[in-house]
């Protein structure tokens, strides 16, 4: 990874803002009064010890969990009750901490599923679509070929041409994570949420994955929110970092600022609380 | 080296997305279809049609239907017999209420009516899964059979409670009723089954099929990437029931000619068709045909071999059949969930490198 210090990039437009969000499960307070924003085009990291509420935060952002309190604005619009399918349609894609691919399908088909939400139609359109697909007629055939073309670009980009036809269940873990990134990219997201994309990878695989993340951000201009435990990767990749601990935000700033923050060091070094 | 993909490079996505991208597969399928359409009708007898070919084709269609729901979309159903009954009774009511209605229209409408019933019974699938869904579909099986037994309107108040198909023609050829010739009933069934198998294959390999398989493999992930579970499952229930409904109409109107709900559409049918897709291959159109062929042929083969060949008691041969079926189902469930279709694929892979072991 690049040894020279990363230039501070400046971002103006806010794509997502989270204000005073709290989420609890029964008695467990997973997130408590957390606020932050994500600017369009940046790579924003969320770090913190296990159980800090990082995954829960992503689940709130893409509408899978419903916070009891707080407000979330995406692209300037405040949202009420969110559902994952709506969040996906609005441009939020994600990968999972434990790979969540469709095991019985090939790499190609898995990534093709990422195109499905773009093809959502009303109930009538959906029925017509089933007939067109069944007969593989005009529009259905054209749309299939268009999607295939888009997906092949992603396959080239992620350098996974050789496993195109392999059922993903047979792939090693590192490649599965890459396919999962491909599926999220196929959704053409504006905001991409990555939950520990490098967990369980060796150094070389981590470097590949870091490069893909930088390239996605660079070439597609995709905004990225990233959860990662490897602190050196985080320092290298991210523009700004949020630190969570026990469901609370304890720091927020550039890598330099966060590194010199005492509370962060305490949380990471396991200094007992009070 | 009879069977090889090497050297067949695809230069466009279009040819790579073709129905059978490998030339040998294409020739094989074309060969089988030509033989079925152009050769068999000249030699077919009543026995071949009624004991082998009609049941094989009709069960294959029903198996495709169940495979769409269970093999592709992962929703276990034990209501197949009930949906067959809906298709059969729909065709009966349509044929007797509208004697002028074209037979093709009768069959399509029977499929559509069954699709609506399927959607109705599919709604609970949003909330209940796996074993519990299977039990719910089982309830629908019993309810439907009970309904057709109890409400005389469905069997036109006939004294026996049975339904019998009236004779109907298409393009001047008699297709239904006792006087229909085996060549005609066979060709009619073959045409419908071939067309619908092709349509099913197209759905399975396109977006519709991908959304089904995504729900099957991991419904939560599918939902999070934006696939709507209820819509996807209901489409699977609708398409699946449509296929099973048409199979039911064929089973009653073209094959059996008359039917009584408990006998023809009981829970045994549900299990028989489920076994077909387990043995043939879950999530495979080809496997649906293989499973149907296997389950239709095996009892006949066993009977010929054990009773006529070895001179054993028919009851003994039946017991062997049940045991063999149990063993096979356990084998396929545990060892090879993709069934005969997958074994066939492995055989092809071996042929490709034949005669070399690697
Ligand atoms: N679905 C859930 N039900 C109950 N508790 C949950 C659920 N999801 C997360 N939690 C709890 O919320 C807290 C934060 O978890 P999580 O967001 O997964 O942390 P992290 O990703 O930072 O390791 C943990 O105490 C966890 O047990
Ligand atoms: Mg986590």
Image (cartoon, grey):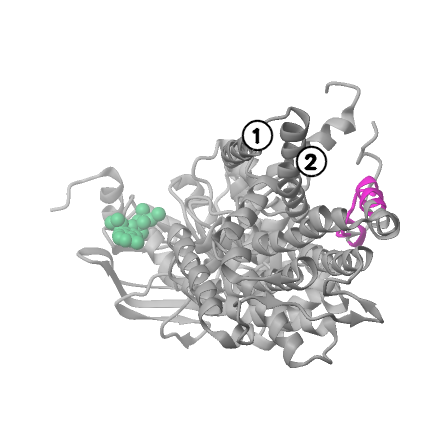
Q: Position of residue A189 (x, y in %)?
A: 54, 61
Tell me which secondary structure the magenta stretch mostly adopts.
Answer: helix
- Vertically, is B278 above or below A53? above
> Is residue B19 covered in magenta?
yes
The quarter of the displayed image where residue B124 is located: bottom left
The one nearer the camera, B151 or A178, is B151
Q: Secondary structure at mark 1?
A: loop
Magenta segment, which residues? B14-31
- Seen from the viewer's position, the closer of residues B87 and B338 is B87
- Specify whether residue B81 is in view: yes
Residue drawn at (54%, 47%) of the image: B272
Which chain does the residue under circle 2 lie in? B
Instruction: Report the mark closest to the observer, 2 or 1.
Output: 1
Q: Is residue A8 visible?
A: no
Return the x and y of residue A66 as percentages of the image width and height.
Answer: 32, 65
Q: Is residue A48 magenta?
A: no
Q: Give the numbered dot on residue B345.
A: 2
Check disc 1 and report the residue beneath it.
B313
Badge 2 crowding class, 10 Å Cα cut-off, few under 14, some 14 to 19, many 20 or more, is few
Q: Residue placed at 48% from the left, 31% from the top?
A: A202
Q: Residue B121: horizontal and vertical position, in percent?
A: 46, 66
| Vertical placement of residue B355 versus A166, above or below | above
Tell me whether marks 2 and 1 sit on the same chain: yes
């Amino acid at each position: 990874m690049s040894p020279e210090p990363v230039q501070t990039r400046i971002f103006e437009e806010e794509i997502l803002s989270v204000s005073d969000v709290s989420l609890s499960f029964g008695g467990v307070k997973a997130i408590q009064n957390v606020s932050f924003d994500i600017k369009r085009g940046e790579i924003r990291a969320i770090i913190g010890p296990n159980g800090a509420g990082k995954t829960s935060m992503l689940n709130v952002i893409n509408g899978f969990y419903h916070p009891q309190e707080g407000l979330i604005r995406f692209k300037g619009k405040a949202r009420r009750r969110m559902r994952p399918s709506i969040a996906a349609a609005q441009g939020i894609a994600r990968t999972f901490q434990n790979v969540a691919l469709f095991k019985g399908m090939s790499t190609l088909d898995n990534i093709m599923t990422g195109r499905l939400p773009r093809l959502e139609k009303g109930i009538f359109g959906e029925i017509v679509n089933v007939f067109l697909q069944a007969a593989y007629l005009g529009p259905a055939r054209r749309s299939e070929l268009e999607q295939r073309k888009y997906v092949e670009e992603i396959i080239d980009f992620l350098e996974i041409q050789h496993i195109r036809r392999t059922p993903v269940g047979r792939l090693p873990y590192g490649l599965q994570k890459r396919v999962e990134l491909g599926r999220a990219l196929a959704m053409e997201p504006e905001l991409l949420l990555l939950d520990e994309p490098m967990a369980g990878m060796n150094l070389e695989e981590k470097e590949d994955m870091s490069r893909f993340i930088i390239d996605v951000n660079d070439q597609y201009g995709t905004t990225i929110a990233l959860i990662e435990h490897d602190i050196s990767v985080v320092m290298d990749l991210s523009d700004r970092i949020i630190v969570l601990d026990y469901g609370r935000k304890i720091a927020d700033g550039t890598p330099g600022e966060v590194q010199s923050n005492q509370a962060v060091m305490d949380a990471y070094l396991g200094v007992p609380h009070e | 080296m009879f069977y090889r993909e090497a050297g067949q490079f695809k230069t466009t996505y279009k040819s790579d997305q073709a129905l059978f991208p490998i030339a040998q597969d294409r020739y094989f399928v074309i060969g089988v279809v030509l033989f079925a359409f152009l050769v068999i009708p000249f030699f077919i007898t009543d026995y071949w049609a009624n004991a082998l070919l009609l049941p094989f084709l009709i069960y294959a269609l029903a198996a495709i239907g169940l495979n769409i729901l269970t093999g592709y979309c992962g929703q276990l159903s034990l209501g197949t017999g009930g949906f067959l009954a809906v298709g059969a009774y729909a065709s009966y009511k349509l044929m007797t209420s509208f004697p002028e209605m074209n037979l093709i229209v009768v069959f399509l409408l029977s499929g559509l009516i069954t699709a609506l019933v399927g959607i109705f019974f599919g709604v609970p699938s949003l909330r209940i899964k796996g074993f519990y869904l299977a039990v719910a579909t089982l309830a629908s099986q019993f309810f439907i059979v009970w309904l057709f037994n109890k409400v005389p309107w469905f069997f036109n108040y006939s004294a026996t409670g049975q339904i019998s198909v009236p004779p109907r023609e298409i393009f001047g050829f008699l297709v239904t009723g006792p006087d229909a010739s085996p060549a005609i009933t066979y060709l009619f069934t073959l045409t419908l089954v071939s067309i619908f198998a092709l349509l099913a294959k197209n759905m399975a390999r396109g977006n519709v099929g991908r959304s089904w398989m995504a729900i099957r493999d991991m419904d939560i992930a599918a939902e999070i990437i934006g696939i709507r579970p209820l819509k996807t499952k209901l489409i699977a229930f609708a398409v699946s029931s449509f296929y099973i409904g048409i199979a039911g109409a064929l089973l009653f109107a073209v094959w059996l000619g008359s039917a009584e709900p408990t006998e023809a559409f009981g829970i045994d049918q549900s299990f028989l068709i489920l076994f077909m897709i387990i043995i043939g291959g879950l999530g495979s159109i080809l496997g649906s045909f293989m499973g149907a062929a296997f389950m239709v042929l095996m009892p006949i083969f066993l009977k010929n071999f054990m009773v006529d060949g070895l001179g054993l008691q028919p009851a003994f041969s039946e017991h062997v059949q049940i045991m063999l079926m149990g063993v096979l189902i356990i084998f396929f469930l545990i060892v090879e969930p993709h069934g005969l279709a997958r074994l066939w694929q492995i055989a092809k892979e071996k042929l490709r490198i034949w005669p070399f072991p690697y």
